[in-house]
Image: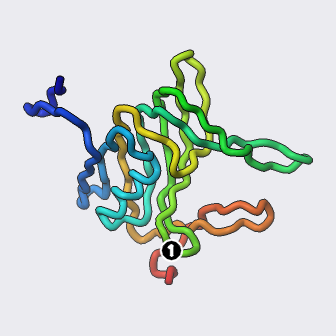
Amino acid sequence: MGKQAGGKVVMNRSSQSVYDKKRGMIMGCLGQGEDLISGLKKACEKHQVTAGTISCIGSLTRVCMVQPEYENNRMSYSKPIVLDALVELLSGHGVLGKNEQGELDIHFHGVFVDHQKTISGGHFLEGNNIVAVTVEFTIFVTEGIQPIRELYKPLGLPIFNFYDESEVK
């Protein structure tokens, strides 16, 4: 059975997005079975956007993330945690930029609740956060700013630094 949407019956949900250039905003959704971060990158590539912030909600059938840990009084991250369970993504936020190789990069954190009403969250990893029904997102596009994720040597972790677009190669 389809769902009513704007006077149309929607039989299946595929990814879609629309870019409002006047307001600097992309709104859209990811379809069932798509990876969350890869899908967000595809929307950015479609609209030729390389900088901004992301906000989203939705549902996932699998979550892959890391969480902070302390090892020898030094901050680190857990090994990847994979949950094969239906969850509601209560809040997802990210920064969109480029990595040192000039490729799109998203730093994404999310909070979710599972069927047992347990709330958790962390730093999501690309490639294994699978959409259950839909993920609806908004990307606020920046003009003149280019985040670049670069290695922060004291921690050995990549972090975003923010540059005036005219300073970037």
Q: Say which element carries label 1.
A: loop
Percent coordinates x, y for residue 130 in the rendering: 45, 40
Q: Residue furthest left?
A: 7
Please tell me whether residue 65 is drawn above or below residue 88 in the rendered image. below
Location of residue 157 (image quadrant): bottom right
How many marks are shown on the rendered structure?
A: 1
Task: Check disc 1 and report the residue beneath it.
Answer: 102
Q: Is residue 130 left or right of residue 22?
A: right
Residue beneath the point at 56% across and 44% down: 109
Location of residue 84 (image quadrant): top right
Q: Amino acid at mark 1?
A: Gly
Residue beneath the point at 39% across and 45% down: 34
Quarter placement of the N terminus: top left
Callout 1 crowding tier (Cα within 10 Å): few <14, some 14–19, many ≥20: few
Q: Residue furthest right?
A: 72
Please tell me whether residue 114 is drawn above or below residue 132 in the rendered image. above
Q: Is residue 109 left or right of residue 75?
A: left
Location of residue 144 (image quadrant): bottom left
Q: Residue furthest top?
A: 116
Percent coordinates x, y for residue 112 in the rendering: 53, 30
Front residue of 109 and 145: 109
Residue beneath the point at 56% across and 15% down: 116
Percent coordinates x, y for residue 134 in the rendering: 34, 36
Percent coordinates x, y for residue 143 in the rendering: 38, 67
Judging from the image, the colouring scheme is: rainbow
Residue beneath the point at 59% across and 66% down: 149
